[in-house]
Amino acid sequence: MTIDFNVLVLGILISIIFYEITHISPGGIIVPGLLAMYINQPQRIVYTIIVAVITYYIVKFISRYLIIFGKRRFAIMIIISILLNIVLELIINGLSIHLLSISLIGYTIAGLIANDISKQGVAKTIPSLVVVMCIIEFVVFIGNIIGA
C-alpha cells in the first residue's frame, strides 16, 4: 500500500486537535492517520493494537525488575513490539494457520501505541485511537464526496 500523504497530514492535524480538546493522546500523533489508511483491513488494525497491549504488559512486567523510564522505556516499547511481532508471526506460520493472514501495520506503530498506553492506560488510549481514526475516515469520505 502506498502512503497517502493527504490522509497522513489530516491524521496529524486531527490527532493534535483531539489532544488539545481532550488531553488524551490517541496512540501518538501519527498513528491514527496511518491506521486510518488500513481501515479496509480491520484484522491488521486489531492485530497491531493487540501487539501494542501485550507489549505494554511485557514492559510493565520487566519494569518490576529493571529501572525503565523516559527514552529507555520508549525504546524498549518499540523493540519489544518488533520482537513480539516476529515471535507471533513465527507461531502463526509454524502452526500453518493460513486463515490468519495478519501482519503488523508498520514495525514501530505498536510500540508508539504501547508508549501512550503506559502514560494514560488502555481505557483512554484505545478508544481515543478508534475515535480519531473514525473522524479521519469520515473527513476523507466527505472530502471524496465533495471532490467527486
Image (cartoon, rainbow, N blue to C red):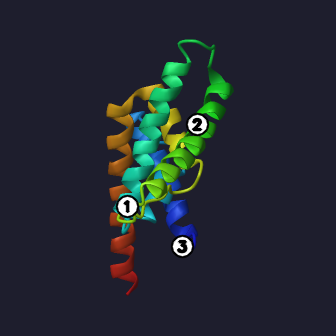
Depicted 94 relative to depicted 25: above or below: below
Residue drawn at the location 45% of the way across and 50% of the way down: 48
The label nearer to you, 2 versus 3, is: 2
How many numbered marks does the figure carry?
Answer: 3
Question: Could you say whether the residue bearing mark 1 is in a helix, strand or loop?
Answer: loop
x then y, percent, for residue 73:
61, 26
Task: Report how far apart the C-alphas of labels 2 and 1 lie in the structure.
Answer: 22 Å
Label 1 Cα crowd, 10 Å radius (few <14 / some 14-19 / many 20+): few
Q: Which residue is mark 2?
A: 80
Give the spatial CA distance, label 2 vs label 3: 25 Å
Let me know if residue 32 appears in the view.
yes
Q: Nearer the viewer, residue 61 or 21?
A: 61
Residue at which label 1 appears: 100
Disc 1/disc 3 C-alpha distance (Å): 19 Å
| Badge 3 amino acid | Met
Residue appearing at x 54%, y 71% in the figure? 4
